[in-house]
Image (tube, coloured by chain):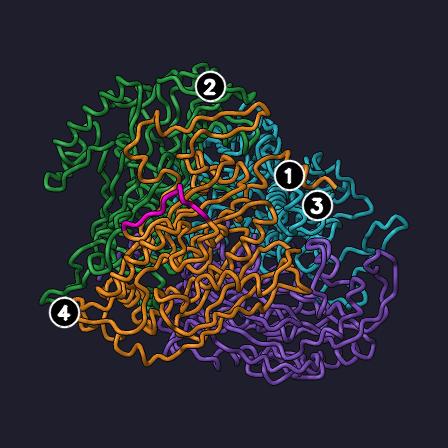
Chain colours: A cyan, B purple, C orange, D green
Amino acid sequence: MAGSSFGNIFKITTWGESHGKGIGVVVDGCPAGLSLSEEDIQVFLNRRKPGQSKYTTPRSEEDAVEILSGVFEGKTTGTPISMVVYNKTQRSGDYSEIAGYYRPGHADYTFDKKYGFRDYRGGGRSSGRETIGRVAAGAIASKLLSELGIEVVAYTKSIGDIEIDYDRFDISYRDKNPVAMPDETSAINAQDLLDTKMQEKDSVGGVVECVVNGMKTGVGEPVFEKLDANLAKAVMSIGAVKCVEIGAGFEVSKKSGSTNNDSFTSDDKGYVTKRTNNAGGILGGISDGDKIVLRAVFKPTPSIFREQETINKEYENINVQIKGRHDPIIVPRAVVVVESMTAITILDMLFISMTSTLRGIKKFFKE
Amino acid sequence: MAGSSFGNIFKITTWGESHGKGIGVVVDGCPAGLSLSEEDIQVFLNRRKPGQSKYTTPRSEEDAVEILSGVFEGKTTGTPISMVVYNKTQRSGDYSEIAGYYRPGHADYTFDKKYGFRDYRGGGRSSGRETIGRVAAGAIASKLLSELGIEVVAYTKSIGDIEIDYDRFDISYRDKNPVAMPDETSAINAQDLLDTKMQEKDSVGGVVECVVNGMKTGVGEPVFEKLDANLAKAVMSIGAVKCVEIGAGFEVSKKSGSTNNDSFTSDDKGYVTKRTNNAGGILGGISDGDKIVLRAVFKPTPSIFREQETINKEYENINVQIKGRHDPIIVPRAVVVVESMTAITILDMLFISMTSTLRGIKKFFKE
Amino acid sequence: MAGSSFGNIFKITTWGESHGKGIGVVVDGCPAGLSLSEEDIQVFLNRRKPGQSKYTTPRSEEDAVEILSGVFEGKTTGTPISMVVYNKTQRSGDYSEIAGYYRPGHADYTFDKKYGFRDYRGGGRSSGRETIGRVAAGAIASKLLSELGIEVVAYTKSIGDIEIDYDRFDISYRDKNPVAMPDETSAINAQDLLDTKMQEKDSVGGVVECVVNGMKTGVGEPVFEKLDANLAKAVMSIGAVKCVEIGAGFEVSKKSGSTNNDSFTSDDKGYVTKRTNNAGGILGGISDGDKIVLRAVFKPTPSIFREQETINKEYENINVQIKGRHDPIIVPRAVVVVESMTAITILDMLFISMTSTLRGIKKFFKE
Amino acid sequence: MAGSSFGNIFKITTWGESHGKGIGVVVDGCPAGLSLSEEDIQVFLNRRKPGQSKYTTPRSEEDAVEILSGVFEGKTTGTPISMVVYNKTQRSGDYSEIAGYYRPGHADYTFDKKYGFRDYRGGGRSSGRETIGRVAAGAIASKLLSELGIEVVAYTKSIGDIEIDYDRFDISYRDKNPVAMPDETSAINAQDLLDTKMQEKDSVGGVVECVVNGMKTGVGEPVFEKLDANLAKAVMSIGAVKCVEIGAGFEVSKKSGSTNNDSFTSDDKGYVTKRTNNAGGILGGISDGDKIVLRAVFKPTPSIFREQETINKEYENINVQIKGRHDPIIVPRAVVVVESMTAITILDMLFISMTSTLRGIKKFFKE
């Protein structure tokens, strides 16, 4: 099955390779009437753009997006929105060496086994540059959600052992530091860790947390199209993610029912909340109106400058030292990718939930 | 979107409620020519059947499966295989009480908010009994995979703080103890923990681990239909799962690239392996031929005998003590569910991978 | 890909063979809150039941439907509705002969070529009995549509050369004659034709016309999910249909633009209509608010008593004379099948159209 | 649901408007290893390009295609192939007038009703230019099919009352006349008819016939994903098509079983054929190995120079005379579109059929 599409009602299809002509996405199923400009998209893309700090590759890319269809007189028309970012850097010379062997932790080997050969330039389709399509689409999904009062916010929760302290949480700080942490002290510590890793010619992993505020109740379809199931797929489809958590996540395995259960409570106006949110805003696969909380766990950048053992295309054991440009950490630039995939999923499932009751449908169609 | 189907080429559709007439599944896209009997299915269902130990509900259900279509003269015909397990226990009387309030940690509240009302008998569609359909389908997927030399095996990895020791790992022991652990010592300790929890009128969470042996290389579709992305969805769609891990899972966030990267190596016959398997057998969303390793993290059973705070349907704060039958742990009976969802996903993605290369397609169609 | 499912939001999955244990359907994505009883379904099924006139097989089947899930206290719950009709007649003895050869005009040969063998009893899965699942689901779709003021009506338009005269059109007469024609004179003539065909041990084809009244405007998704494209698929998927027409259908090939174009016109209250309806209520794949008109063209029953040439399983040329029970005409019993497939398609596309505009979505979610 | 994608394993997603920046398509699921150049695509696009005869709009468009991804070193990589044709003519000035009213026979009214407003320039997304994406994708599907020995050929069967004579059938003549007829005499007569229509400021409809040679047996999935059902959807999704026929098509309604049934016969080498092909190569929704034959019936071009009645955006009755450029006949340029949609469908269903039997799957995976 073609694997480059995601979503049902709000559906995205991405294309493009790291060093091909460009990277793009077609967003289909976007409702008509949303004000949309290239600037709306660019703001999102700039958050994942390379070259913004010493922790990111200096590859010189503007990542300037162009909208090719689906917008007329400043508004979406309901027809597919095609967006493209043309690649500036297409030199394949840089990559002649890695064409001959399989980098550990990369998809070189599996692409060759699957397809018989591969576009080896910068990882081709398996490059992190592929996420440009996700983020461009995520910008639209986020804008639509904000029209409905729903806000998706992601940030770096941890880098290696350095974790944010929620007592110091300040989301406005996220965009003011190169590691996208909403906590100044942790951000400084994390940068120290990264400096060390760079000196050691090594890399490190980390965790992105994503929160959805203003969520509607009743979104998610039992049994297989549960909201958390779709979020898990959305987030696990991002390269380098090896674990997805909802709410209390892994910790629930060590908890008791009495401490894990979130008690419902209502105030004197009958407004319902939960005393805790171990569920992460999802019960039985359906949103409960509380904040949705999820985490994506990223592995360390597989490209490191240190010498590594591997095999070449002739299946001979060799030692390699990967050249070129790579970040010592994936997480900071991945924050907006997690945010985008979450927004796309939430929006699509929200649309799907519109037919849950006959009463809602009748109200909709009553002139 | 209808949420009760899973898969593309090999597709299952489940139906049924805890205390309705029955639970069933339609398996569509099963290739013709597989020997299949009700006994093949029953073996799987028996692994999740209630009443097998003091840690499971004594609800008296045979869970006897009946095949209604798709099998002729002992072989699958290629057309849909409909299977049903009729419920023995349909007394709705037991549940008249919980109809009036929302149990913490359950989907009562979200079903009511989504659909306007709910089948409150035993959780209705959100009951764990829903997994009967998954397991019946999983039995078929597993049998098909074994015809191709692929074996899917799941077991309990941990219950609360009690974790198996891989030095004592013995898979044959899994089916000889009520907690499905492949390690005798840990199984005994886990039972002690469960006894304590039962005395405390409480429950506990745990982790199921699943391994796929004999996996083919090249399965999984970049970008959104990655093998790990689909496994994450498959597993997260199981009720009570709050975290999914692939390979080293959460631990990768604290690792360095130099220790997380799995070096490729080849023996003198050119047979390729990896020195480690932090990747869990998947690189860039595509199987690398190594064991696939994943973990599903389950929350504690939300139904506990202890008094809890909650709200009733009138949104008044109340205290409740849930009566009835419930297990102090979900994990042991969920092992076969994780195994089933993994098998279904692997099989479906395996089928999809058959069109990866023109060479493979031409070979297939050459008479 | 599994082929037994149809629809997206409102999705049906059918199963069962002519002489297996039963025939069934799972209806998923039905909104909660619809009053639904087995009687609602039975009324539809009775319209396609055998044994109702001398023109239908005397096979003794009650076709009594049972609802197994998805309805609680008389209302749909939003979860899958599983329905089954158990087969009374399961004698495979009748069919031992046809197991050995390929009936002309039937799917015997193609099933064997595709699957390696087949369930030969009464055509197995390729039997007209398969449509029971479609009709049971269609009953639900029709009931939902009627809640929204939309009515789907099908009838026999022609049998062989006998065509209804719209000047004598009386829909109430449709259910009072064995050929389902809404015109008494034509119905009598058609029965004469059928009597002749039966004497000649032959069969004849015909046309079913289907009209959708009260249709909403704006339903259908450009480019590939056009309303007419989905209706064409829905109707062509019915066994024995070889042609689908929308509006003026085949006749448009001979018309001029000046006579084929339907002029828009508005009355003094600004109510818009078209002076003609060659478009059949669909322009650019989107409903225009006018009546939707389509026709399904059915081939003659392939089973005839006359001797025919064919081959046996050993690919030897033989002459055969098919025994058993068969109708001289497919059309009258297919009327409710066309109606059902149309209703399912219209409903599904109607649901999908709910997200066409941001304005509509915002209105829906405004509390 | 997003409506701009078609196919499952081999999936296309199109985008673009008549007078936007361009028109494009993403082809996903194309197997790796196919030699592919822009020239392969251009040959197909040139067959639908405007300005090639006096019967087509003189709009000056090169329709030069650019491949943006998915091809590396001359071969497809298995990843999405993005193709774009930039529009030369983007003058929206021409269309200021039609923005204010609804052209009869066009989608202006339905787009406005569905989306609240529309891109009125040249029909926007509902323009025939949308088919560029289909044809570019069809070129790839056709090339893949030819690698498997399958050839898809379409041609004009009739224009108005002028129909080809199969006794004079010469497919090589198809590309040598402006009406794409494979019969010189009929082509001349058809041109006379068109000249008359142009003088009368009118247009005319016609029929495209499409044949698939070298078809594999066993392609098509019962019950809803029948090969003919999917072909019907594929073809009916083309703008202006109002009827789809398979094999004998509409004529079967007037036939008897004895004349409509195609007798199987085998030669002395056991090679199976049918004496006739009223089935059009499809029995029970599955290909029987014979030629597949289908017809798409096109309405006359709705844009005519003659004065017509309609309404404006204020729903006032007005008379209009449409200016600009339009063809007196849609059919000749639509031939390659029908061919493309057929090829895409056949290829996708062929891929899907690969998992019909366990035996075939085991053979595929045996190293």
> What is the secondary structure assignment of the residue under circle 2?
helix
Q: Which residue is mark 2?
A: D98
Which x, y percent locates residue D325? Answer: 34, 19
Q: Is residue B281 left or right of residue B160?
A: left
Q: Nearer the viewer, mark 2 or mark 1?
A: 2
> What is the secondary structure assignment of the residue under circle 4?
strand
Q: Nearer the viewer, mark 4 or mark 3?
A: 4
The answer to whether residue D153 is visible is yes
> What is the secondary structure assignment of the residue under circle 3?
strand
> For the magenta stretch, what is the residue range?
C161-170
Residue B312, by quadrant, is bottom right
Instruction: Tell me whether the residue at label 4 lies in contact with that at label 3, contact meaning CB atoms closer than 8 angstroms.
Output: no
* Distance (Cα) linking label 4 and label 2: 64 Å
Q: Amino acid at mark 2?
A: Ile
The quadrant of the image that shows the C terminus of chain B is: bottom left
Residue C327, by quadrant, is bottom left
